[in-house]
Image: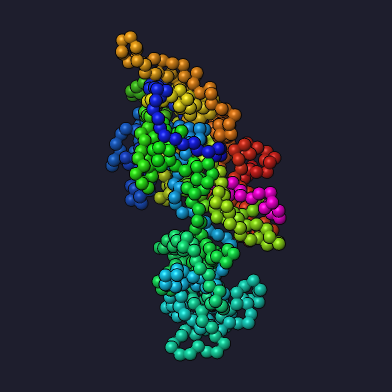
Amino acid sequence: MPFTGTCKRGALTLGPKECLTGYFDCELELLTPLFIPNTSNKSALCNEEERIKKYTGYEFCSYEDLSGDTRLGKAGPKDPVIPGSEIRGAVRSVYEAAFGGCMSTMRVDGALGRRNPSPKRPGIMEREGKNGWYLYPCERAMLNAGPTREGQKMPVEVYASLKEGQLLWIKLSENRYKNRNYMDKVVERYKIPDGGRMPDGYCQAWLHKGEPFGKKKHHESVFYCKNEERKMLVPEEEYRAYQQVMDKYKGGKAYSASPIDENRVLVYYVNQNGVPRNLSPACIGNEIFQKTFRKILESNGGFQPCADMSELCPACKIFGMVSDGNGTKGAVCSRVRFADACLGGILGSENAEDYYGPCVVLPEAGEPRPSAVEFYTESPYKDKDKGGWKTEGYWTYDYMFVKQKGKEVRELLEESLPELRGRKFYWHHDGWEKLEKNNPLDGEMKQRIRPLLPDHMAKRERKFIFRVYFDKLNWDELGRLRWSLDFMDPICAHKIGRGKPYGLGSVRIHINNLKIRELDANTGRVELTELCYENLGHNIAEDSEAVKTLKIMAAAEPLRHDVSYPRIDGNKTESFRWFVNNRTRKETKTLQPTFSKILPKAEEELDTQNICGKRLHT
């Protein structure tokens, strides 16, 4: 869902126009299976062995306390409940997207980073008193500490006894590894300093212990400095980013990630016009970017979460907000309340088994990866930058690669780039039908669930009814709330609950009636008056980009059949390989920075014949 225009903020003022108090009577229709967990027992659908392994199996939501209860093999609850908080969250997301609200639930201050496929340069970073940290550019040589025959062999027990940054005296071979020009030189001879004089023809070097030896790694690295006069000052923000990278490596097995001492550390870096950037303990490793989502949102329409009660977006004015804690800027209470959706009528002794599908294990689902800029951001390239690229180019949150004299070089992005693609919404589709029926519960990332079936699958009619209460709204706000409930379109629907990527949770809200509280001027009595809700919302611009795109995403008739995570043909599970392949140059099969494809727009996804060539797969 694209951001459009700017997020217009202002103080909440309750004047004579904000006089509407009452409620909508609503009904919730299930279009696909739905699952919302009863969180009183996370192992309710687990057997004894699975509980010991701390696996997860949730029963469907109800008011029952399932603490200590085992529900596996039993029928689902007779009185399922759809919490009002689930419905409220979906409706608020629509309100924010359609009417210029802020990104209220977005974590905007976390560090953004990504594994960079481009090799970096080696260097030694040293602290020089109050002057800060300086980086001395180095060269890297290959030390025979593994399964190779080139250079003097370092015994395994000697290598194991040495620490990161161990000082060595080395003599370099005239040749590079296997005489390949693109490889580093090999250490022909080495000595561990013993207090004597360094032999002629040798130079100082420092051992850098990287990842463990395996099928591909055949040497360890040593850094040696040719010219100490070429030192470069490390900007404070780059050093802070380096510390965040080190925090990622702490506790891991891949790298020692430890400094030589408190004033010296071996690093890899990128030379950006004489400034060392993207410092890392690995040649090909993580890098932390200077920009955050807050900075990007502030530079592109100001859609960062509201944090000041005197500066509220349209959505926070009626749904409320709480300050982010950076100061005492207060909170604003909500002027709408969503009741739980419960089954109308009394079930009595009816067999509740028909209401539910068989228990199913949801596959492992990864968390959002905002580092995937090819999905989360717009391309920063202008027409003049696209020359020479056969693909979409390559960029991060801080820089992009451009072609200069036949070479690809980094260019820092403007403060406002890259722009975020917008808000995350899910397609309505039938992906649950493709879930494996016998998928085992064999990991902590999986969970067993009991889904609630829609009427056409349960073969019986049920009504989930609920109310949406509002207080002190004006007519425009009430119209927008009505639109956010039913889209003023019978084919549109919301997504709630768990398993949304797999097609679960498509629900449609029907408004049955609207009642407004009115004061009788003659008697002084407060009465509820029924009004025609269909008269609301007709002043909403249906041709705006936000509303049009939202309706494309919300269309639930018919359900789509072609929705899935990006995948390689023949592989339905390992979507991460698609992202790897998407950065691999087909002509060289090397992992160099380039994107073959980027996330298409909603209207491009509707191009099922892929005439535009933008779809990720067909």
Along the line of sight, the residue nearer the viewer: 538 or 442 = 538
Along the line of sight, the residue nearer the viewer: 418 or 76 = 418
Which of the 4 quarters of the picture holds residue 183? bottom right
Give left or right: position of 348 versus 493: left
Along the line of sight, the residue nearer the viewer: 114 or 50 = 114
Residue 444 picture location, percent across and down: 40, 50
Residue 602 picture location, percent across and down: 59, 38
In the depicted structure, whether residue 531 falls above or below residue 417: above
Tell how many labels: 0
Visible residue check, residue 588: no
Visible residue check, residue 97: yes
> Residue sitting at 62 percent across and 53 percent down?
595
> Residue sitting at 47 percent across and 25 percent down?
476
Highlighted range, magenta: 374-389
- Indicate whether residue 377 is drawn in magenta: yes
Give left or right: position of 262 versus 603: left
> Residue sitting at 60 percent across and 74 percent down?
184
Residue 101 picture location, percent across and down: 48, 36
Give left or right: position of 117 versus 354: right
| Magenta-colored segment: predominant secondary structure | loop
Residue 12 picture location, percent across and down: 40, 32
